[in-house]
Image: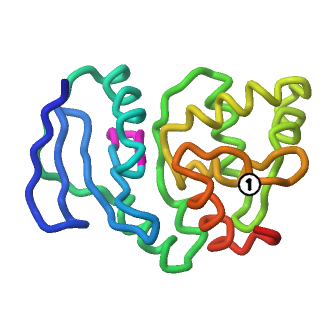
């Protein structure tokens, strides 16, 4: 089990985890976002109420961790995003790990422009695997970096909002924030 220690005021609290990870928190309009990064970039972003699932992802990848104060550059970009600079997400380096297929899906998701949506089937077809919409859905659900890898931009074939690991309410808010129509 990980031991997390932190210092500082809310929204500025940060931790260093082992020699290669840093952790911080950010208050957003959707709740507290927990952020973890390697030297390569952001590796986990999870809303606090969905943290348990993402914590398992982090521990599978890095094992038990101990934390101390640090700062992440992603915080400034996320603040800019929530303040209306939708392109700010593109300036955040990511290091999500995952399988080769998951990595392809996540790279593709980062290319879906803010204010637009894609269906699972469209993504599968664009990846050259038109029958893999369920696999795209599974990769989307396994995305460890909420908001930054915009899994909220995927919708069902009918255009309906489908599940979102952090709740459909948040997915709808993010899509409206980005100017997507019909949500």
Identify the magenta region: 37-46
Please identify the quadrant where the C terminus is shown.
bottom right
Residue 45's place in the image compared with 64, above or below, is: below
Name the residue located 25 percent from the left edge and 66 percent from the top edge.
11
Name the residue located 88 percent from the left edge and 28 percent from the top edge.
128
Q: Is residue 63 left or right of residue 108?
A: left
Residue 72 sits inside the magenta stretch: no
Residue extending furthest toward the bottom: 83
Name the residue located 72 percent from the left edge and 33 percent from the top edge.
137
Front in this rendered view, residue 180 or 112: 180
Say what secondary structure mark 1 lies in: loop
Q: Residues within 10 Å of mark 1 (few under 14, many from 20)?
A: some
Q: Is residue 103 left or right of residue 54?
A: right
Please identify the quadrant where the N terminus is shown.
top left
Q: Quadrant for residue 124, please give it.
A: top right
Residue 148: give x, y in percent of width and height.
53, 53
Residue 94: give x, y in percent of width and height.
48, 44
Residue 104's place in the image compared with 115, above or below, is: above
Q: Quadrant for residue 105, please give it.
A: top right
- Which residue matches tag 1? 112
Front in this rendered view, residue 39 or 80: 80
Residue 151: give x, y in percent of width and height.
64, 47
Residue 136: give x, y in percent of width and height.
74, 31
Front in this rendered view, residue 52 or 146: 52
Name the residue located 17 percent from the left edge and 48 percent from the top edge.
15
């Amino acid at each position: 089990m990980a031991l997390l220690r932190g210092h500082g005021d809310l929204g500025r609290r940060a931790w260093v985890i082992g020699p290669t990870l840093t952790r911080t928190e950010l208050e957003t309009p959707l709740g507290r976002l927990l952020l973890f990064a390697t030297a390569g970039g952001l590796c986990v972003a999870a809303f606090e109420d969905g943290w348990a699932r993402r914590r398992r992802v982090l521990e599978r990848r890095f094992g038990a961790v101990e934390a101390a104060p640090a700062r992440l550059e992603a915080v400034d970009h996320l603040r800019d995003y929530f303040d209306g600079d939708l392109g700010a997400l593109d300036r955040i380096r990511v290091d999500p790990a995952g399988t080769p297929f998951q990595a392809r899906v996540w790279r593709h998701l980062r290319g879906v422009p803010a204010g637009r949506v894609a269906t699972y089937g469209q993504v599968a077809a664009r990846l050259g695997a038109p029958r893999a919409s369920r696999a795209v859905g599974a990769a989307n659900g396994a995305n460890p970096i909420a908001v930054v890898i915009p899994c909220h931009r995927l919708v069902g074939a009918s255009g309906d909002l489908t599940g979102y690991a952090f709740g459909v309410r948040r997915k709808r808010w993010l899509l409206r924030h980005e100017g997507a129509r019909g949500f």
